């Protein structure tokens, strides 16, 4: 009898709960994109940033505060595979500097970048520095590096903005080169197919020493780097030099292709067939990424 009553009570509870109307789930509140730029007509820098955002979809920032309500901060130290805890950023403090940087981005940087190369956002800064390990003649040391361009997961930092207005033409060319190099290195490194033929030209000469007349085993004959299809901004050491690695080879072409016009490059290296072959392959690789030579 007790078992019968217990079962009856249990069935009643079951019916009670099964008849209770389920509460509809509440939709999550709409979260605005913190990178979205809104117009501020009372501030010319903010207004111009908004107009560029409306035209291109690229937010330009000049501080680490993305939104104030709620407060959302930019963490620019995150890269694709690492976190740079040594990165230090000094932000801009004047609207004039922001406008200078914005005009530079509009006229000198964005026109060269195809869709896939356009950064998610751009942070204009007075300076961006970090600690890097350098190897100088076998002696390793940690030095502070002042970056011109520094790519991260969610933003491209363009540093030294306060200095742009006073840059001589040659200095501005090298400044732009450093920024483009920062943008292009990672996507180009991820495309082995684009660099395969370029690397093959000088692959047999990597990691060698150039010394003497070639009669010494293990050494290449001492000759200009360009003889082996290699280029560098550094002067040629007397009597001996190391040909460097594949990474050095690619970096050397970045430095020259991004600072010399096609005519200037041909005038300087036209007598070196391997260099001219690699120039053609390298510029085609950059074009395949969506880069338009300035």
Image (spheres, rainbow, N blue to C red):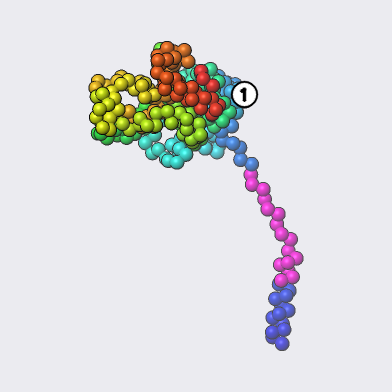
Closest to the observer: 140 or 29?
Answer: 140
Note whether 187 is above or below 257 in the view shown.
Answer: below
Q: Position of residue 286 (x, y in %)?
A: 51, 26
Q: Residue at coordinates 39% horizontally, 24% vertically from top-left?
A: 229
Q: Residue at coordinates 46% horizontally, 19% vertically from top-left?
A: 97
Q: Residue at coordinates 75% horizontally, 65% vertically from top-left?
A: 19
Closest to the observer: 210 or 59?
Answer: 210
Closest to the observer: 52 or 294?
Answer: 294
Q: Which residues are magenta?
A: 14-29
Whether the magenta-drawn stretch holds residue 244 is answered as no
Tell whether 249 sits left or right of 54. Answer: left
Tell whether 74 sits left or right of 135. Answer: right
Tell whether 286 sits left or right of 209. Answer: right
Instruction: Tell me the chief SS of the magenta region.
Output: loop
Closest to the observer: 81 or 61?
Answer: 81
Q: Residue at coordinates 69% horizontally, 81% vertically from top-left?
A: 6
Return the residue at label 1. 55
| Label 1 residue SS | helix
């Amino acid at each position: 009898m007790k078992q019968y009553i217990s079962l009856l009570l249990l069935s009643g509870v079951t019916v009670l709960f099964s008849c209770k109307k389920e509460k509809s789930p509440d939709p999550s509140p709409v979260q605005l994109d913190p990178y979205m730029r809104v117009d501020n007509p009372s501030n010319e820098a903010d207004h111009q940033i908004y107009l560029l955002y409306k035209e291109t979809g690229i937010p330009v920032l000049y501080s680490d505060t993305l939104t104030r309500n709620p407060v959302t901060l930019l963490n620019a130290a995150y890269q694709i595979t690492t976190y740079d805890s040594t990165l230090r950023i000094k932000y801009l403090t004047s609207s004039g500097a922001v406008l200078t940087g914005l005009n530079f981005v509009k006229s000198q940087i964005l026109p060269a970048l195809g869709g896939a190369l356009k950064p998610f956002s751009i942070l204009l800064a007075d300076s961006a520095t970090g600690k890097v390990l350098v190897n100088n003649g076998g002696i390793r040391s940690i030095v502070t590096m002042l970056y011109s361009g520094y790519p991260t997961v969610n933003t491209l930092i363009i540093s030294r903005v306060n200095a742009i207005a006073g840059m001589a033409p040659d200095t501005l060319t090298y400044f732009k080169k450093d920024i483009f190099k920062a943008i292009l290195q990672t996507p180009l490194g991820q495309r082995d197919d684009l660099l395969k033929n370029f690397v093959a030209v000088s692959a047999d000469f990597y990691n060698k020493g150039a010394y003497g007349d070639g009669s010494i085993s293990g050494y290449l004959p001492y000759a200009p780097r360009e003889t082996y299809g290699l280029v560098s901004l550094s002067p040629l050491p007397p009597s001996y030099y190391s040909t460097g690695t594949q990474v050095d080879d690619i970096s050397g072409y970045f430095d020259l292709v991004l600072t010399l016009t096609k005519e200037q490059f041909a005038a300087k290296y036209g007598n070196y067939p391997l260099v001219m072959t690699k120039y053609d392959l390298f510029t085609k690789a950059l074009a395949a990424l969506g880069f338009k030579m300035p």
